Amino acid sequence: MLRSSVSRVVDFCSRHAWWVIVLGVAMAAASSLYTLHHFAIKTDVKDLFPSDLPWAQRAIDYMKTFPQPGMLVVIDAPTPELADQASTRLTRALASRPDLIRAVHQLQGGPFFERNGLLYLPTDEVVGLTQGLVHAGPLLQTLAADPSLRGALNGLSLGLMGVQYGQIQLDDLARPMAMASDTAQEALAGQPASFSWRALAGGRAPEPRELRQLIEVEPVLDYTVLEPGLAATDAILHTAQDLNLDSGDQARVRLTGPVPMDDDQFATVRESAPLNIAVSIVAVLVVLWLALHSARIILAVAISLGVGLAISAAFGLFLVGALNIISVAFFVLFIGLGVDFGLQFGVRYRAERHEFGDLRPALRSASRKAGVPLALAAAATALGFSSFLPTSYQGLSELGQIAGCGMIIAFLTSITLLPALLTVLKPPGEPHPMGFASLAPVNTFVQRHRFPVVAGTLLLVALASPLLLFLRFDFNQLHVRNRDAPSVATFLDLREEAQTGTNAIGITAANQSAADAIAQRLSALPQVAQTRTLDSLVPGDQEQKVKLIQAAADQIGGSLSPQQIASPPTDAQIVEALSSTSYELSAAANDRQGSGADAARRLSGLLLQLARADSGIRQRVEAAVVASLRPSLEQLRRELSPQRVTAQSIPADLKRAWLAPDGRARVQVLPKADPEDTGGLRDFVAAVLAVEPTATGPAVMMLEAGNTVTRAFIEAGLFALAAIAVLLVITLRRVADVLLTLLPLLVAGVVTLELCVVFGIPLNFANIMALPLLLGVGVAFKIYYIMAWRSGKTELVQSTLTRAVIFSAMATATAFGSLWLSSDPGISSMGELMALALVCTMAAAVLFQPALMGRPRERAVWVVRRVPMGVRSEARPRAESRRFRAEHALAGARDHDRAPEDERGE
């Protein structure tokens, strides 16, 4: 009944070709308009998972209780003063953009840390710093009274005077002189000049973290566009440009965090798409030409595929409302799988055209032979995709819903629009058979040695099965991101800094006491690097630190606040100061040896060059010295009057990140493992969850999401195999034939996963999409072969069917394999695994399945001989192969098709 139904549909469409084409084009146009007006993508990754999952619910509650910023602005500058200044200016400017910025918080800055910063240093550092300040009292007085380049030179002269009187050694001034020389040399070379008084006071070169400021930003996100945080990102970068931070403060502004990293990934995919699409189209067209050898047939297949895609896209949007970042892969899946139906029908049509000569009989014969396998393959593929619906992975569920319907639409266009287009386009006849005669030796080998081929394949697969124990799902999203993307490069640069919270775990405690107890328990775990709570913001040993700071303030407080400040010097006065200081340095160095003398001679020469240079160069040096001197003096005045820090005195905006209004407290747990060490992160999460099962945060969410995805694909695969098996039992009505169909599919799947281990391809959130492809294409290929075998076909390896399967697999492989060229590691790994899966699937269909099936069954048929009247008739059984009956049926069909229409019988 199915064969006759498909045949009637094809015959009807070829008779009324123009009406079918007009209707198909009209439906495609209407579908395209609907898609254009209703197309939407939900880019919020939280939508990929149901909110009622336990780990997802914990994450949602945690983020509601303690809002996460989403963006981290990183400011690097040559000196700590310039970094502070740029950070403060940018924070104030961003706070005035509530349309794009919900909240902005300067992590290390603000009045609180400016006043109490010394309390957060180790006690020994506070001792050394306060002692140094007391010894530098005369210098500080000179600088405070004349905060200019002239004052700085006078301070250096004061130090040289100490050398002259034997109070200090010239080598003690080596570092200050070297820093001054570097600033002067930069200005003379026309480069941006900088000088750090804070670094000078610290007695050492600043560490990278001291030259960096971090700003947390909670952006306004627009999930209706591909890059939800792009508007906020552009606003931040444009604001920094408007403030002239790059040249004025010599600051570099970068962004990282979940939002910029997701946006950069979407941007990378978008930028790679044109190349991937171009390569895919060219490669598919080449494969179609090799398979069909007719521009008219290729055009018909392409139009049929395009119409099916347009209708499927509109119907999919009607079903789900908006695509997500997983279901949007439907477009690629449809092209990769849908082209199989058109190519199978096209190759079968070519084979029948060679047999019959005329177009219409060839179409009817092709529909009778290919209709049932195509219909069964479409139903099985759609059923396989539909099995994704009950899974807990929302992204996969919606993809299954759309793709399942798409496969039915692709089949319908292949038996309606494609025959109509072939009728109108009238491709030329086929002078040559369509099989692969060159594969005859392979066919002979497979049939003669079918038992060794089958047994050897199964034995090899079984022996390699221990490899599956090493197959891992890499939940680390860092491995599926482009490392050259700005946000990812910044993230990798900051991964060692605790303040960024890289892969941190968050826990919500009932109150602050409970939070401290949890932090203490978790800090004992070997996988934990650090635990933080609100009490972590209360510095220790405050009593001693405050006494040290107050003692230093009593001695140098007057020096920092002179009653009279000198007016800014003129250029002539600066030239005079440069010349005199150069002479003093030269005299101090004289014929001495050592680092101090060498530094003095170098600085003396540079100061003399500055004195003789253009006034603009001296102004740059003046700006470099004064720009950091005045804020450093002001900062020092504030730091010398700290307040004892308690949990109650911490500013409200800072406290809110750790303590909710209802009293619940936050615990942050940081891992020892490197962010790129997936195994270390897995151990870290497992260890913390064993102690605190309610833990959440980025690391937990990544691991739980990976587990959810893995379970979803396993469940979907089992559902799909069960549903397809039921369908095959109903249609094939033989359990043995069902096993002959499913066993090669399972072998292809197992071999693909084993090769993933061999080639070092871990499963991840992106390439796991290859498994539905393997299921869809694999079951279709296996059904084609089992149906041909049941109809009595032999020599399958060199048959027309194998030609169609090989070229179909090549077209699909090139369509998906082009993704391998993507600069996004996730998309690239998807293309890599899809290509591998298709190779395994094709090999299982072309080589393993024919050997597994063997020759078609033989069964007894009754032959009744006609005898003359009066002679006893005789009926006896004769063993007749399906091939014999199929050949006679084909001959009858040829006679039927070639006979005039009025002479054709039933």
Image (cartoon, rainbow, N blue to C red):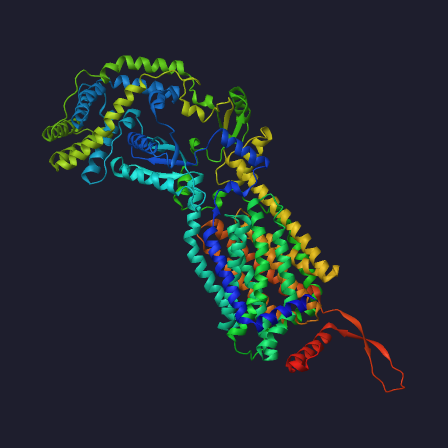
**In-front residue for pair 96/339:** 96
Image spot of residue 34 (x, y percent) = 48, 54
Residue 533 locus on image (x, y percent):
48, 24
Q: Is residue 611 left or right of residue 829?
A: left
In the rendered image, the quadrant that contains the C terminus is bottom right
Question: Which is nearer the eye, 681 or 330?
Answer: 330
Left or right: residue 142 versus residue 729 is: left
Instruction: Check the image and report above or below for 647 versus 335.
Output: above
Q: Nearer the viewer, residue 607 or 567?
A: 567
Question: Please, is residue 96 above or below residue 784 in the view?
Answer: above
Q: Is residue 455 left or right of residue 163?
A: right
Left or right: residue 781 compared with residue 146: right
The location of residue 294, given as percent across then percent down, is 50, 73
Is residue 505 something that shows in the picture? no
Quadrant (top left, top right, bottom left, bottom right) of the N terminus: bottom right
Q: Is residue 786 visible?
A: yes
Q: Compared to 718, does 208 lie above or below?
A: above
Q: Residue at x 32, y 16 (%)?
A: 641
Kindly indicate the quadrant of the structure image that contains residue 708: top right
